Image: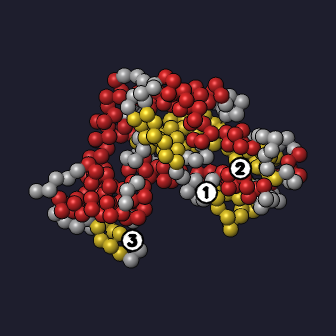
Amino acid sequence: MAEITLRQLRYFATLSRVLQYRRAAQQLGISQPSLSLQISALEEAVGAPLLERKRNGLILTPAGRDVAVRALHILAEVDGLMHRPLSAHEGLSGTLRLGSSPSIAPYLMPRVLRKLHEIYPDFRLIIRDGPSKALIEDLLAGTHDLILTQAPVGHDDVRFYPLFREPLLLAVDHGNPLAQQTSARLEDLSALTFITLDPAYTLHRQIKDLSELSGAQLRQDFEGTSLDALRQMVALGMGVTLLPALYSRSEVERADSDVCTIPLAPPRMRQIGLAWRRSSGEPAAFLEMSQQISQVARAEFSGCVRF
């Protein structure tokens, strides 16, 4: 009799959620043939087909629905067992997999990594960027141990541990009259056109909400996938946007910057934090990681973020 492996269950849990082989393979970081092979092996071990192919994707069979529920419970128990020893001691060791929004990690984590390497030379942190929605999906699938993201996470099975609040600044080109002001009020925005990120990013909602609140327009023919893309569009006079303060400090507050950023009055903020599966409990390693990130933010970005 064929044996069921944790790998098969983890792969099937991801596939049963997204119901597309291509998308599931991308989230798992494997090829579609490898995924198909593991799913076929699981079906052989279970003795029943778990999926049916339809024109627009996959659907779960009755057996597939049952296995999907059982797989999630098994994976949650295994995850809790794996992290339980970490609760017994402080410090960081081994390897942790961190997912992060590309609007946060590049401007914060290099400084955190430098400090972690000094304190815990044997500790290894693997960082993978992704949009907010994909980060949550990959966290629940077990691809990440924890993620650096912004609230809200929007899932009951995920715990959010707040670290700091980051202002969102209005970015305009140098020819915009607002570039000469020290702050921008809500009524100053009504005649503007906002450019935003893809809806998979939480920042998209915040930009959209501000444009609607102020009566501004939201550009429909462009949705960026990076802050750099938004900044370049603003520099070309195609619209305005919101940029996080850490990004602004790194990429905008320079003498040769192609755009300028202005604080909003009242301020618009986003809450940054670490998130992990509730089934993981409160591992000391996760709490230590939270503390180290907070300490770096306080030491190096105290005038930029709020606590």
Residue labelled with disc 1: 225
- Find residue 57 and name its label: 3
Which quarter of the image is occupied by the C terminus? top right
The location of residue 77, given as percent across then percent down, is 28, 41
Residue labelled with disc 2: 242
Residue visible at 59% across and 28% down? 296
The location of residue 7, given as percent across then percent down, is 28, 51
- Total labels: the figure holds 3
- In the rendered image, the vertical position of residue 262 relative to residue 287, given as above or below: below
Dot 2 alpha-carbon crowd within 10 angstroms: few under 14, some 14 to 19, many 20 or more: many
- Find residue 183 and name its label: none
Looking at the image, can residue 171 be seen?
yes
- The colouring scheme, among rainbow, by chain, secondary structure or one colour, is secondary structure
Dot 1 alpha-carbon crowd within 10 angstroms: few under 14, some 14 to 19, many 20 or more: some
Looking at the image, can residue 213 be seen?
no
Q: Which of marks 2 and 1 is nearer the N terminus?
A: 1
Residue visible at 62% across and 39% down? 107
Give the Cα distance between marks 3 and 1.
25 Å
Residue type at mark 2?
A: Leu
Residue furthest to the bottom:
55
- In the rendered image, the vertical position of residue 113 relative to residue 59, given as above or below: above
Relative horizontal placement of residue 78, taking residue 249 as reference (left or right): left
Residue type at mark 1?
A: Thr
Q: Which of marks 2 and 3 is nearer the N terminus?
A: 3
